[in-house]
Amino acid sequence: MKSTTGAVPFNLAWLVIVILVSVASVSLLTTPYYLYAILPGLFLFFFLFLGKFPQIGYYTIVFVIPFGAFRGRLPWIIAAVLILLTLFRFLYEKQISPRLKSLLWPLLLCFIMVNVITSVKSEFSEYALSNVRLLAVGYTFVALGMIFLSKKDFENYLPKTLVISMSISSFLAVFGALFHVQAFVFTGVEDTELRATGGSIDANNMSLMVIYCIPLTVHWLLNTRRPLERAFVFFLILLLLEQ
């Protein structure tokens, strides 16, 4: 006979979430901010959608990487939901994803601890600790990818997502340079000093991402067999090389 003891807490958790969302929506209706009453329901829908297709959330974070000047808090919100989904999965399945099994994690943890200790002792501890936080965020992002993405995702869809996103940013950079759109270019002290930024925070960051994406794009070009797709990828390479 199939046991249902594990499903009871899971269903109870969802019941509690639905009740909390309903209470939050009704409470907002009684305040001057009644227009925001729809937000708890939208967040629940967003949460359920990412629960069904978590890889789409991960792809979205990757897609907005080249748009640092415009992305705002969107990637942080999606990452927080994915972490919450991971905790729910752990509470339900009582185990960590087997994809996370690696001998490198204890070494990485020791590495972060050493960084924390040296940062605290550093003369510029605040700046050093901010970089340690970014390091921890990077490892967390890698861990989320290991949990929610398959081998096919890593080999096929994820690189293409980044290449297409970077190509769009490059197109914005070219457009901004040609038509002097201030949102996509950086103008120096002298008006003649004009550097394209696209969707990135600065021109150097833009160049670094282009350099990273060119090998991925060339790999895509060499491995596709469809003529139309090959022409499309070749056009993307031209966009990237414009930088």
Image (cartoon, rainbow, N blue to C red):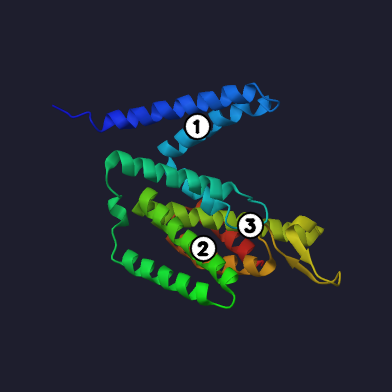
Q: Is residue 224 visible?
A: no
| Residue 198 position in % (x across, y down) | 69, 59
- The answer to whether 80 is drawn above or below residue 124 in the figure is above
Mark 1 Cα shell of 10 Å, populated few (<14), some (14-19), many (≥20)? some
Instruction: Between label 2 and label 3, give the one nearer the viewer.
Output: 2
> What quarter of the picture does the C terminus occupy?
bottom right
Alpha carbon distance from label 2 to label 1: 29 Å
Taking 34 as reference, is 211 left or right?
left
Regarding residue 172, the answer to whether it shows in the image is yes
Residue 56 sits above or below residue 220 on the image: above
Return the disc, 1 or 3, that comes first in the chain's sequence. 1
Q: Which residue is mark 2?
A: 133
Q: Is residue 11 left or right of residue 77?
A: left
CA–CA distance in space, label 2 to label 3: 18 Å
Residue that mark 3 sits on? 68
The quadrant where residue 123 appears? bottom right
Image-quadrant location for residue 199: bottom right
The residue lying furthest to the left in this view is 1
Residue mark closest to the camera, 2 vs 1: 2
> Label 1 belongs to which residue?
44
